Image: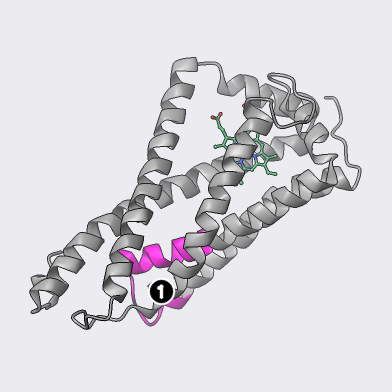
Amino acid sequence: MSASAIGFSDSRAARFWNATIGKKIIMAASGIALVGFVCVHLLGNLNFFNSVEAMNAYARFLRIEPALLWVARGGLLLLVTLHIWASVQLAVLNKMEARPIGYVKRKNTGSTYASRTMYWSGPIIFAFVVYHLMHFTWGVGGTAFEELHPSENIVAGFSVPAISIAYIIAIGMLMLHLYHGVWSMFQTLGVNHPRYTPLLKKFAKILSILLFIGFISIPVAVMLGFRPPQQ
Ligand code: HEM
């Protein structure tokens, strides 16, 4: 949608709109795909509660086709890169908009609240993912690690309360980020309807709460002494 199509007469405002909308769409599209990954990852992780064998078989299954695994990893990396790139670009544009020149009349209160939490939770989540990869993928997170034995690695990792608590805090932040992200994505896509908007907001809230409970159930269970059966 062009700026003139939505009624901007001021050419600077039009340029601002054109500069931001493409980036917001990139944020939203990469964000949706990343939420998809997070949901699938949680479903895979819940195998932990079935048995040691179920969890480890899942890890082996992911490696049945190494080429496919690397395509998926490449795709994830591309999505994360696009998401971060667009967020940095939008932060710069937002700063320009905030300059007291007084030419942009459009005021988007929803995105200012979201952006405040998004810009500090984003880097923390990034740091968490790097540590998480060191921990469970590369095996250099400081706790016992054996390739293709995620079940034992998870028990070893989450038996250290400081690690479990750090995970729980980071997952909480991710879910806050996801809640605001899903919500502002609906706005970006132009979904704004008196009946559906509150429902979508509720959907974003329920999804992030369910994901939060699902993810933290694992470190909480390990801290409470749960150990999966062998078979
Ligand atoms: C308590 C929560 C979590 C547990 C127990 C967990 C467990 C694991 C395990 C065991 C692996 C290694 C899989 C393998 O190599 O076979 C892994 C990889 C990964 N996890 Fe998590 N995870 C959790 C939360 C998260 C969250 C919240 C995110 C998203 C930000 C995430 C993102 C990733 C990524 C990107 C990989 C690398 C995938 C790959 O390249 O193979 N994880 N996780």
- The foreground one among 142 and 49 is 142
What is the three-letter code of the residue carrying label 1?
Thr
The location of residue 133, given as percent across then percent down, is 61, 33
The answer to whether the beta carbon of the residue marked 1 is less than 8 Å from any atom of ligand 1 is: no
SS state under label 1: helix
Residue at the image position 69 percent from the left and 56 percent from the top = 169
Percent position of residue 170, x then y: 65, 53
Q: Is residue 220 magenta?
A: no
Vertical relation: 55 (above or below) 109:
above
Residue 196 shows in this picture? no
Residue at image point 53% right, 46% down: 126
Residue 16 in the image: state x and y as whole percent. 19, 67
Q: Is residue 84 left or right of residue 54?
A: left
Left or right: 224 in relation to 82: right
* Outermost front residue: 100
Q: Main secondary structure of the magenta part?
A: helix
Q: Which image quadrant: the N terminus?
A: bottom left
Residue at image coords 47%, 61%: 119
Residue bearing mark 1: 112
The quarter holding residue 10 reads bottom left
Residue interval drawn in magenta: 178-198
As rendered, which of 181 and 40 lies closer to the eye? 181
Above or below residue 191? Residue 175 is: above
| Outermost right residue | 225
Q: Residue at x 39, y 41 (%)?
A: 81
* Front-lying residue, 9 or 208: 9
Q: Quadrant of the C terminus?
A: top right
Horizontal placement of 224 versus 219: left or right?
right
